[in-house]
Amino acid sequence: GAVVSQHPSRVICKSGTSVKIECRSLDFQATTMFWYRQFPKQSLMLMATSNEGSKATYEQGVEKDKFLINHASLTLSTLTVTSAHPEDSSFYICSPKLAGTDTQYFGPGTRLTVL
Amino acid sequence: QQQVKQSPQSLIVQKGGISIINCAYENTAFDYFPWYQQFPGKGPALLIAIRPDVSEKKEGRFTISFNKSAKQFSLHIMDSQPGDSATYFCAASKGQGGKLIFGQGTELSVKP
């Protein structure tokens, strides 16, 4: 149980383009979805929290217009990095929370490289 | 008060030895303390978690020890194996809606 998929696993794009990352909880429902980014050798940095059907809540310093989060269903959430720049290159990881519990699972991550 | 401090930053253990990673927190409202294991290029995987009403929880070779009065908790990996070589993160949260606050991570290397 607790299978989370993320697509794509790797993406390379040119500066100025937008990239959409998809996260699915395959065998459970997630009322809450967290999105993290992680730089090499560092801890996970929470970017935003979204509840199904509601607008996402962004952490301080994270631009909501740059990182668009959609949590349209209990099993699917997307993160769109708009007008990506080289400094957005990072490892992005989704983390759905099992409904009614404290338990957070993590996706396999998406490596974004912006040229 | 929201911080979780993790130590050591890196750890080298011989195969068969015990790996110990420590975490300390300030916020007494935290009520859920999970540990995650992360391999390079992969997302973190939930290893084991504990609540403050118990002082120890064991799952296989992994044990969490929890000291509520000291506001500390630790992960013990018994009979450490080279396959345990990974980065380990402790975390803490409060309430069901709370977000996880992560420690800085410990890079564990188990030598054969």
Image (cartoon, coloured by chain):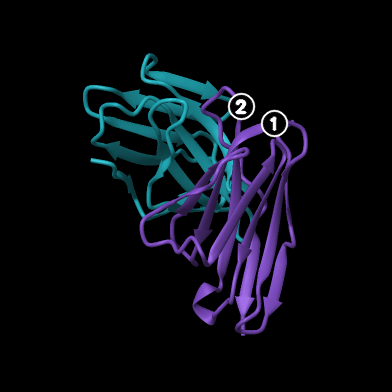
Chain colours: A purple, B cyan
Residue at the image position 23 percent from the left and 36 percent from the top: B26
Figure quadrant of residue A92 = bottom right
Subunit of mark 2? A
Image height of A9 relative to A95, above or below: below
Residue B12 in percent (x, y) is at 44, 54
User: At 65% across and 73% down in the image, what residue appears?
Assistant: A18
Q: Which label belongs to residue A29?
A: 1
Discs 1, 2 touching: Cβ within 8 Å: yes
Outermost residue to the top: B53
Q: Amino acid at mark 2?
A: Ala
Give the residue pinned by disc 2: A99
Residue in the image at 25% along x and 27% along y: B28
- Count every numbered label the image shows and give the total: 2
Is residue B20 shown above or below A87?
above
Left or right of A92 on screen, residue B6: left
Q: Residue at x 51, y 64 (%)?
A: A65
- Identified by mark 1, the residue type is Gln
**Distance from Cα at disc 1 to Cα at disc 2:** 6 Å
B92 on left or right of A70: left
